[in-house]
Structures are given as C-alpha cells and as structure tokens.
Image: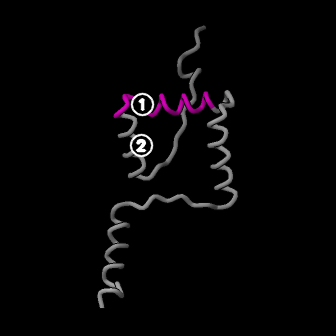
Amino acid sequence: MSISRFQLKKSIHINLNKETHAEFRMALFQRGLSMQEVFEFLALKIVDKDEALDKFLDEIEYNKKNKTVIKKINTSDAESIFDVISQQNPLEK
C-alpha cells in the first residue's frame, strides 16, 4: 500500500485583506516565488528555531498580548485624511 501525497501534506487556510493579499502576491511574483514556497520555508525555519524568525514571533506575541494593532493605511484612507486636513487647515484662514 503506497502513501498518497495527500496523506503526507497538510493544508492551511488564512485570511488576508484584499490589499495585503495583492501586495504580498505581487512581491512574491516579482521574485518568482509562490505563497506555498514562502510559507513552507517559514514553517521550516520556525521549526528549526531560526533566531531571526524567533524574534519575529516574539514581536507578534508581544503585539497580541498588548493588543497592538498594526494597520496599514490604504490609499483611500490617506486621501480622506488629507481632505479633512485641507478643509480644516487653520493656517489658510
């Protein structure tokens, strides 16, 4: 009885916002990498106790414990902020 590839692999499912997913995918595409290759590499490094990734995990753990939210401002958010600032600029009065 042979073991199928399905029995040797596990799949993961993650949720990313659309902008992060698109930028992540583009960055990998520009390097000729797939998400599969990157996540497999990261998982192996974490299992092997890679020092740099351990520090990275420490940072994620710290942010989670301290409820630090890391949110990237997207273009429309930035434009909205600048619109409000320009409408309420006290230096222009």
* Amino acid type for the residue under numbered disc 1: Ser
Q: Is residue 20 left or right of residue 9?
A: left
In the rendered image, residue 24, in percent from the top left (x then y), is placed at: 41, 43
Q: Residues within 10 Å of mark 1 (few under 14, many from 20)?
A: some
Asked whether 84 or 38 is in front, the reply is 84
Q: Do the numbered discs 1 and 2 sit on residues whose CB atoms are within 8 Å?
A: no
In the rendered image, residue 92, in percent from the top left (x then y), is placed at: 29, 87
Q: Secondary structure at mark 2?
A: helix
Q: Is residue 28 left or right of residue 65?
A: left
Indicate the quadrant where residue 55 lies.
Answer: top right
Asked whether 41 or 91 is in front, the reply is 91
Asked whether 13 or 52 is in front, the reply is 52
Q: Quadrant of the N terminus?
A: top right
Q: Residues within 10 Å of mark 2 (few under 14, many from 20)?
A: few
Q: Magenta residues, as a range?
A: 30-45
Q: Which residue is mark 2?
A: 24
Question: Residue 35, relative to residue 75: is it above or below?
Answer: above
Q: Earlier in the sequence, mark 1 or mark 2?
A: 2
Indicate the quadrant where residue 90 lies.
Answer: bottom left
Residue 34 got which mark? Answer: 1
Name which residue lies at 64% across and 55% down: 63
Q: Is residue 33 magenta?
A: yes
In the rendered image, residue 23, in percent from the top left (x then y), is placed at: 38, 46
Q: Secondary structure at mark 1?
A: loop
Name which residue lies at 54% across and 22% down: 6
Indicate the quadrant where residue 89 lies.
Answer: bottom left
Residue 77 got which mark? Answer: none
Judged from this view, the residue extending furthest toward the front is 91
Q: Is residue 93 left or right of residue 64?
A: left
Q: Which is the main secondary structure of the residues drawn in magenta?
A: helix
